Amino acid sequence: MASCADFAALRASPSDVRVVASDGSSIAAHSSVLAAASPVLEQMILDARRGWDAGCTVVRVLGAPSDAVAAFLRFLYRGPGAGGTPAAAEEEEEWAEGAVGAHGAALLALAHAYRVPWLKRRAEAGAAARLTAERAVDALKLAALCDAPRLYLACARLAGKDLATVERSEGWRFAARHDAALLGELLQLLHDADQQPEGQDAGRGSGQDMEASGEEGDQG
């Protein structure tokens, strides 16, 4: 796999692939960076180059806003850790924190779909840290879709602490009216929260098993 320094050098070189987002916007990129960062993107690039227009490689990254896709690609170029001088690394880390704050849910979904484990862990942690009672139901759905046990546990802890606000949220009311399966998950969430002994962190006990299974899944 190429090093972060190799990726940085590539930014100034001619791109050989276009990443197209859901709104049709196009981002120039380098196939070697994308393929090294994501096995899913690697296969998509290979498949695109077998097509009739192999000279113009297009990869479609759908299901997320274009600015979230742009942030996702920048993370792929950046890698798990920022390099360069301490000042540059600090600036890059500030950008990364801001990107996770602005696009945490989308980054989690993209990292899960394109199998980028280190970014998935970071985005999941960011989503859990910024969780609110009003968004707990949406976060629970995201946790289920993305196999994100840490986020699920954060939802359980929040439900145990602020059930009244969770039940007043639009997500809860929608589930009660239209989504019996989701409502069942929410009731299970409350059951999980109730099962935690007083004073015990919901991340302990059975939650550790969930987190361990999530880490094993990330490694796959």
Image: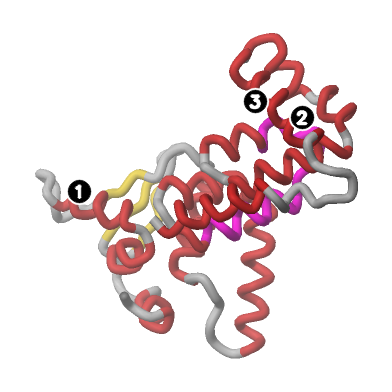
Seen at 33% across and 77% down, the residue is 2
Seen at 42% across and 45% down, the residue is 113
Disc 2 marks a residue whose amino acid type is Leu
Are the residues at dot 2 and dot 3 in contact (C-beta closer than 8 Å)? no
Q: How far across and down, in percent of the image, does residue 3 sit? A: 38, 80
Element at badge 2? Answer: helix
Disc 1 marks a residue whose amino acid type is Ala
Mark 2 or mark 1, whichever is nearer to me: 2
Q: How far across and down, in percent of the image, does residue 40 sit? A: 32, 52
Disc 3 marks a residue whose amino acid type is Glu
Residue 67 left/right relative to 15: right
Element at badge 3? Answer: helix
Q: Count neighbours of disc 1 (C-alpha within 10 A) and say few if under 14, some if 14 to 19, many if 20 or more.
A: some
Q: Which residue is mark 3?
A: 185
Q: How far across and down, in percent of the image, does residue 8 sit? A: 42, 78
Specify the color scheme: secondary structure
Q: Which residue is mark 2?
A: 190
How far apart are the alpha carbons under marks 2 and 3?
9 Å
- 141 within the magenta span: no
- 120 within the magenta span: yes
